[in-house]
Amino acid sequence: MTVFEKAERLKNLPPYLFKELDRKRTELRARGMDIIDLGVGDPDLPTPDHIVEAMKDAVEDPDNHRYPSYSGMNELKDAVSKYFDRRFGVQISAETEVLSLIGSKEGLAHFPLAFVDPGDVVLIPTPAYPVYHHATLFAGGESFFMPLKKENNFLPDLEAIPSKVTQHAKMMFLNYPNNPTSAVADHGFFERVVRFAEKHSILVCHDAAYTEMAFDGYRPLSFLEVDGAKEVGIEFHSLSKTYNMTGWRIGFAVGNQALIEGLGAIKSNMDSGVFQAIQIAGIKALTHDQSCVKEMVEVYTRRRDLMVNGLKRIGFEVESPKATFYLWIEIPRGYTSAQFTTKLLEKGVVVAPGNGFGEPGEGYVRISLSQKSSRLEEAIHRMKSITF
């Protein structure tokens, strides 16, 4: 049998956390165990009806069955521009500062290919969504990790980055509201980022997938709201969590024209754009009444409160997050993240080990709220039986 040697870029790639969680979940279900999956951030709520109906109508139109525009339909880019003005008060050129994506993950993964050369340094928060580091490796870049610590409100300490690193740094990834820590960033922090980027000629790539999943009246910022941000940065948005469209694969990038053009050049050589019927559904999502988003947030608010109160009741120290649908929980003493995750697996509860997002995540687990309240209550009941 012929043995095919994998490329070095794959050999050097760390295991993808969520693929491993999926494998473990499938294995346990095959044994007949009742699994409560709180590991992966995949909304259990359905896509709103008006978006589904728009998709149905668009699928039946044969004009949508051909290749779409590489950069996205003009109508979609116009909808994004108007949405951004309405939601964040930021003026975005539909013609030159918007690019459609096959989900924001795809755009984030491709972006370093446009601007990172072998040997360039990319500043990456840790713990973090694994794609930032993996995309850097694919581009031949070198990752410099910025630890997100509780004592610093899970914000990177820009002043702690050595000058020998900033001299070679080409790009910085950020993500607020944050996955996995649920931390949020204020205007002052983003201002410091812009000044830092200007000083060191670093481009900023902000993953803003969770801006609409926020609680108690809190309204997360766009990085682009800060003066000068558009001169140094690009921001990635997703329809996945906001409109429960994870499987549809649609998102968009907005920001600096040169950065949009660079990503667009990579994508035009890598893919053929987003299926036009899905873009039409995306237009409906962005332009229609946003009460569906409000209703979704209300559901997650109830789940957050149920889970936070339940975990506190059984002995966990946990803070109630302002945004995202994740809880970032310190585990009981005497366990590593992996050990505690395994202990929960034995009870049929799947969570994501904190160290899977990076070394500073050791001592934590991430819990997703993407299950019905009755299942969350059952998860708390099962966790209660673990000896602290």
Image: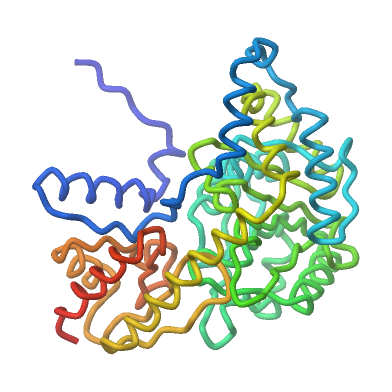
Q: Is 197 in front, or is 117?
A: 197
Quadrant of residue 340 in the image? bottom left
- As drawn, which residue projects farthest toward the left? 31
The percent position of residue 28, horizontal first and vertical second, equals 15, 50
Quarter-wise, where is residue 362 in the image? bottom left
Rendered view: 9 above or below 205: above
- Viewer-proximal residue among 6 and 219: 219
**Quadrant location of residue 30?**
top left
Considering depth in this image, is 54 or 386 the residue closer to the camera? 54
- Across and down, in percent, residue 128 comes to 51, 62
Seen in the image, is 160 located left or right of residue 203?
Answer: left
The chosen color scheme is rainbow
- The answer to whether residue 360 shows anywhere in this view is no
Residue shown at the point (52%, 50%) measured from the top left: 131
- For the image, the number of numbered tags is 0
Quarter of the picture holding the C terminus: bottom left
Whether 132 is drawn above or below 310: the answer is above
Residue 338, image x, y percentages:
26, 67
- Image spot of residue 118 (x, y percent): 63, 44
Residue 86 seen: yes
Q: Residue at x 68, y 30 (%)?
A: 267
| Quarter placement of the N terminus | top left
**At x 45% / y 73%, what residue is drawn?**
304
Q: Residue at x 16, y 55 (%)?
A: 34
Task: Please give left or right for residue 164 compared with residue 313 in the image.
Answer: right
Front one among 38 and 111:
38
Report whether 60 appears left or right of 8.
right
Describe residue 286's horizontal placement relative to residue 336 as left or right: right
